[in-house]
């Protein structure tokens, strides 16, 4: 039983935090949020070469460092704290994960090393216009044509879909949901960035017209791997949400300590103090939800993972949104301005809340998985 | 969930499981799940059960052997609490002395006090009541007014600066043998006070002192003419706590715990005693209640109601989060680390969420949940719902918890105090 962090994990946290303090400042976040590409390739390279963040939890035989999910969770908590603008979630939490979960050793050997080294930016294209994250939401057509598999149809809300070098696409064949790899340069692929409410997290619409694709794993058997990937990603997103909420609370507390009204710091008034205390209760509870999920990923059985993941998303999504909103409230009018960073966290919280399905959706997943 | 801390602890766990299976039978088994920190139900059976535990040498697992304990470590204590709760054994009648007074004496008591008082706690021969709160000092314990004076005026002669006045910053030295304290005042909310043989009482020994200065912790025998204990009926109809009237009650001079004038420190040490182990059984009880709630909802067809369904899932989420939070604290304690903020936020979260669970259970029970037995006899669900209203009050109200979190964990400025 080990629901605490090791010294190595504490050290990893320090290293990542220190790196992000230098390379993901508020100025960087604002610059990249305004930039259509949404990330800084130089920083992306340094993340890979200096600390090996992209390959942290990728097994060594595929070019990674073979760390566990608790370690990866530490990193996501820190990228969440910093509101890192980079295709890290798409590449690591989604794309690398689905490759690990699909039954295709050759594909893993071909594709994972590039992701682990940061040379390949990858993403998972799953959602369609229906905005659903379940199996029946996948309708994009794949057909076995001349010269191999072809995809025709539309994926949308694809995280970093406009800049990814590699798209892993969930599509439907006569045998069921299958997974495909599509290169960014493939003919018949049109990618359109979507203007997003949360500018720190980019999304794209991706149109396939008879686009050549490589089938990964057995045809029609991709859903279990996709479902497991979504569970893993839910837990990692929860860790990211905890980090974001923690920064929002830090900001609120700092402001409440310094800002004076009626001749005393506003943090000395119970109205503000108790709000901040409630924010911490929310965050520590969210931490338990997220850490429980990470722990399950490293040690638990599949049923436990499925339950912990749904719980983590249902709870942490709402916790981050609530804390980010309360941070604006504690800041008063200044917190409502474009210049103040509070809104960046609120928007990240809101986009995270629906990124892998809404809290209501995850509650229902949880209920189903518990047999309620 | 299994708590596994390796082979040695596993042996301990198995021994405990076997013992519980063998002894938690008959009347004891019928009272499974009965009781709680504020629940006076089935007192006599629970007391007998405590004596059964004492006979098996299961009380004070972590206390030194010389005082009647088992001399084992934190891991065994945690496993004991967990397995105990897992077996759903009745809540221990002697919880107050085991969880608060005992650890306080171990930390701050004199050797003579430890030898005198700890063994009878573990053998359930003497029961204790806490005398901290007063009608004018609930959450604000620094307002304590119960006075204690040396009958022989001996305390005035003990000052290390040789002075005789009480003001200033010089500290009184330790306690002399001989002489007595005379205690007068009123205490209230003394849990299970009507059963107490002894009281540990926070008193003001310096009449000119203010706030947390000039307080002293005294051990006072309850069986004497100067002590009158009257039961107070709680909202569940139980005589679980009491008010205590002290009128020139007497206790020996050497019954001071810690130093004279340093009673605040002693009291705070008591209240700050690690609750990680006691939250664990509480949370297991909550888990049982959540399961029962889901069962009830299924019976009533409430799972098809989307509004209720959502609240039911949220109740389940709450108890799971309590569990993980407790496990985080235990993991940190057993790793020799200082527990993080979750150790402080856990109480507020648990007490709030448990009340929501209670409200939901009562709603699901519907009109049938409104009918009680003879003599206001409550079922588990009704009792738990009503008693959960105390959880956001005792051990520091939720409002006080928010102040503690705000000031001590987040470092926000203190409220201006007069």
Image (cartoon, grey):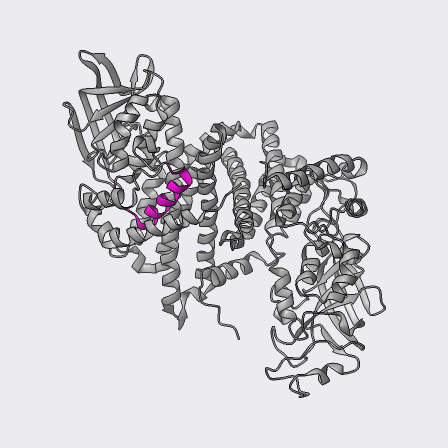
Question: Left of B399 or right of it: where is B242?
Answer: right
Q: What residue is drawn where x is 78% and y is 76%?
A: B177
Q: What residue is drawn where x is 60% and y is 67%?
A: B140
- Judge whether residue A308 can be spotted in this image: no
Q: Does the magenta stretch include residue A84?
A: yes
Q: Report the magenta residues as a range.
A: A67-86
Question: Left of A143 or right of it: where is A68?
Answer: right
Instruction: Farthest residue to the bottom: give it.
Output: B163
Quarter holding the N terminus of chain B is top right
Question: Which residue is more in the foreground, B30 or A229?
Answer: A229
Residue A273: x %, y % from top left: 45, 61
Location of residue B36 with respect to A260 vertically, above or below: above
Location of residue A264 with respect to B321 vertically, above or below: below
Location of residue A79 with respect to A181 vertically, above or below: below
- Judge whether residue B401 can be spotted in this image: yes
Q: Main secondary structure of the magenta part?
A: helix
Q: What residue is drawn where x is 45% and y is 63%?
A: B411
Question: Left of B195 or right of it: where is B393?
Answer: left
Residue B31: x %, y % from top left: 75, 39
Where residue B34 sits, quadrant-wise, is top right
Where residue A58 sits, quadrant-wise, is top left
Location of residue B404 with respect to A241 vertically, above or below: below
Residue A322: x %, y % from top left: 40, 48
Residue B84: x %, y % from top left: 68, 42
Q: Is residue B251 magenta?
A: no
Question: Which residue is more in the foreground, B251 or B314?
Answer: B251
């Amino acid at each position: 039983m080990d629901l605490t962090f090791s010294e190595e994990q504490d050290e990893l946290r320090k290293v990542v935090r220190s790196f992000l303090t230098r390379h993901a400042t508020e100025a960087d976040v604002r610059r990249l949020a305004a930039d259509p590409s949404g990330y800084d390739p130089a920083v992306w390279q340094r993340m890979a070469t200096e600390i090996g963040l992209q390959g942290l939890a990728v097994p060594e035989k595929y070019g990674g460092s073979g760390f566990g999910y608790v370690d990866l969770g530490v990193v996501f908590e820190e990228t969440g704290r910093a509101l890192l603008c980079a295709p890290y979630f798409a590449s690591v939490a989604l794309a690398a994960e689905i490759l690990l979960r699909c039954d295709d050793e050759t594909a893993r050997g071909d594709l994972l090393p590039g992701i682990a080294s940061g040379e390949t930016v990858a993403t998972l294209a799953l959602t369609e216009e229906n905005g659903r994250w379940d199996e029946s939401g996948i309708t994009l057509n794949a057909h076995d044509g001349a010269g191999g598999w072809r995809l025709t149809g539309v994926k949308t809300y694809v995280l970093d879909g406009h800049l990814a070098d590699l798209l892993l696409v969930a599509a439907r064949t006569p045998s069921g949901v299958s997974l495909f790899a599509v290169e960014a340069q493939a003919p018949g692929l049109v990618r359109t960035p979507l203007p997003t409410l949360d500018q720190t997290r980019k999304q794209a619409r991706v149109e396939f017209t008879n686009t050549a694709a490589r089938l990964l794993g057995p045809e029609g058997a991709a859903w279990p791997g996709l479902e497991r990937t979504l569970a893993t990603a839910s837990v990692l997103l929860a860790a990211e949400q905890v980090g974001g909420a923690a920064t929002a609370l830090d900001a609120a507390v700092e402001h409440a300590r310094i800002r004076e009204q009626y001749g005393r710091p506003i943090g000395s008034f119970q109205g503000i103090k108790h709000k901040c205390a409630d924010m911490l209760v929310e965050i520590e509870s969210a931490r338990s939800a997220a850490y429980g999920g990470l722990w399950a990923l490293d040690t638990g059985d599949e049923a436990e993972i499925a339950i912990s993941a749904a719980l983590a998303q249902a709870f942490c999504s709402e916790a981050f949104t609530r804390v980010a909103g309360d941070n604006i409230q504690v800041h008063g009018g200044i917190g409502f301005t474009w210049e103040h960073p509070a809104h960046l966290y609120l928007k990240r919280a809101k986009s995270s809340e629906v990124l892998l399905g809404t809290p209501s959706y995850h509650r229902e997943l949880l209920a189903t998985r518990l047999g309620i | 969930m299994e708590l596994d801390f390796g082979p040695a602890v596993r042996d301990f766990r198995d021994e405990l499981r076997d013992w519980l299976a063998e002894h938690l039978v008959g009347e004891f088994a019928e009272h499974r799940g009965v009781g709680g920190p504020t629940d006076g139900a089935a007192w006599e059976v629970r007391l007998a059960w405590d004596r059964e535990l004492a006979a098996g040498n299961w009380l004070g697992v972590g206390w030194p052997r010389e005082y009647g304990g088992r001399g084992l470590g934190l891991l065994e204590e945690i496993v004991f609490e967990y397995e105990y709760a897992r077996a759903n054994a009745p809540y221990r009648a002697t919880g107050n002395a085991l969880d608060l007074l005992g650890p306080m004496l171990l930390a701050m008591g004199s050797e003579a006090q430890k030898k005198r008082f700890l063994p009878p706690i573990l053998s359930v021969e003497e029961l204790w009541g806490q005398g901290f709160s007063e009608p004018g000092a609930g959450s604000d314990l620094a307002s304590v007014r119960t006075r204690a004076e040396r009958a022989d005026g001996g305390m005035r002669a003990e000052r290390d600066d040789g002075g005789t006045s009480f003001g200033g910053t010089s500290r009184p030295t330790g306690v002399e043998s001989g002489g007595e304290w005379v205690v007068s005042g009123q205490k209230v909310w003394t849990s299970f006070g009507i059963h107490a043989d002894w009281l540990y009482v926070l008193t003001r020994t310096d009449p000119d002192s203010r706030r947390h200065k000039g307080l002293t912790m005294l051990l006072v025998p309850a069986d004497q003419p100067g002590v009158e204990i009257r039961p107070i009926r709680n909202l569940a109809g139980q005589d679980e706590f009491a008010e205590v009237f002290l009128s020139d009650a007497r206790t020996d001079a050497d019954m001071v715990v810690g130093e004279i004038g340093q009673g605040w420190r002693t009291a705070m040490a008591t209240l700050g005693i690690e609750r990680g182990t006691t939250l664990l059984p509480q949370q297991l009880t909550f888990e049982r209640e959540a399961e029962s709630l889901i069962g009830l909802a299924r019976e009533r067809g409430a799972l098809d109601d989307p509004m209720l369904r959502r609240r039911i899932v949220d109740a389940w989420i709450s108890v799971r989060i309590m569990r993980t939070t407790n496990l985080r604290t235990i993991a940190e304690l057993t790793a020799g680390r200082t527990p993080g903020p979750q150790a402080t936020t856990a109480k507020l979260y648990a007490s709030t969420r448990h009340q929501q669970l209670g409200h939901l259970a009562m709603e699901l029970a519907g009109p049938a949940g409104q009918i009680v037995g003879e003599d206001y006899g409550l079922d588990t669900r009704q009792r738990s719902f009503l008693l959960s209203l105390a959880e956001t009050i005792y051990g520091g109200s939720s409002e006080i918890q928010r102040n503690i979190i705000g000031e001590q964990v987040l470092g926000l400025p203190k409220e201006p105090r007069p």
